Image (cartoon, rainbow, N blue to C red):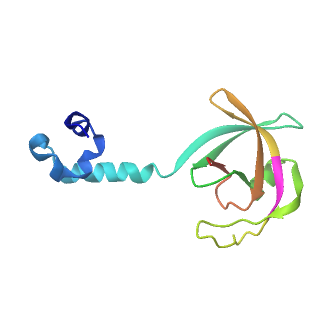
């Protein structure tokens, strides 16, 4: 790596010993803590999205968790029922596994919801698997 790139690396502050005299009067310990806290907060990304029921065209604003470790779109069962989404029964239940590869305590996914999802002027027809998400209403997977 060229020295020019290394000197512009914003994450080089995580290794203060590599910066030498460039820090001058900056408190290195505080800088490291600030960046570590920022990185910690970025692990959860929440988006405000709009959902539209296909049957009634009723719109609902919802806070969704964007999760890069998840492979699909999920809607909480309680949220789906309370908001009156039409749930379609799946022909075959889908087994849900947690990150640790164990079966989810909420059981298999037996229903799905189809709706329009809106985010910053973009609309997408979405199929969401319905399961118990606890306090989270929507999870948007990225894989």
Q: Is residue 132 above or below residue 43?
A: below
- For the image, the number of numbered tags is 0
Task: Check residue 28 for magenta coloring.
Answer: no
Q: Position of residue 88 (x, y in %)?
A: 89, 52
Magenta stretch in the rendered image: 109-113
Drawn side of residue 22 relative to residue 34, left or right = left
Picture residue at 80% right of the left edge, 48% below the top: 83
Residue farthest front in this picture = 1
Question: Residue 24, can we see it?
Answer: no
Q: Position of residue 96 (x, y in %)?
A: 72, 65
Please say whether residue 5 is visible from this viewpoint: yes
Magenta span dominant secondary structure: strand
Q: Quadrant of residue 127?
A: top right
Name which quarter of the figure residue 8 lies in.
Answer: top left
The one nearer the camera, 41 or 100, is 100
| Residue nearer the viewer, 45 or 21 | 21
Coordinates of residue 108 in the picture (x, y in percent)? 78, 66
What residue appears at the point 16 percent right and 46 percent down from the top-left corner?
A: 19
User: Is residue 84 rendered to the left or right of residue 16?
Assistant: right
Q: Position of residue 26 (x, y in %)?
A: 15, 44
Picture layout, residue 102 above or below residue 120? below
| Image point (20%, 37%), residue name | 3
Q: Is residue 67 left or right of residue 128?
A: left
Q: In the image, what residue occupies the spot 11% across and 46% down?
A: 20
**Residue 110 inside the magenta-drawn segment:** yes
| Quadrant (top left/top right/bottom left/bottom right) for the N terminus | top left
In the displayed structure, does residue 54 sit left or right of residue 128? Answer: right
């Amino acid at each position: 790596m060229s020295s020019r790139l290394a000197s512009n690396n914003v994450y080089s502050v995580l290794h203060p010993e590599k910066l030498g005299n460039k820090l001058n009067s900056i408190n290195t310990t505080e800088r490291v803590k600030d960046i570590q806290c920022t990185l910690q907060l970025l692990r959860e990304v929440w988006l405000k999205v709009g959902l539209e029921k296909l049957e009634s065209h009723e719109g609902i604003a919802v806070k969704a968790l964007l999760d890069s470790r998840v492979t699909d779109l999920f809607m909480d069962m309680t949220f789906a029922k309370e908001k009156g989404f039409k749930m379609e029964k799946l022909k075959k239940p889908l087994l849900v596994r947690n990150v640790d590869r164990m079966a989810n305590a909420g059981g298999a996914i037996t229903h799905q919801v189809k709706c329009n999802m809106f985010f910053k002027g973009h609309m997408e027809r979405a199929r969401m698997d319905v399961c118990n998400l606890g306090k989270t209403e929507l999870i948007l997977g990225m894989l």
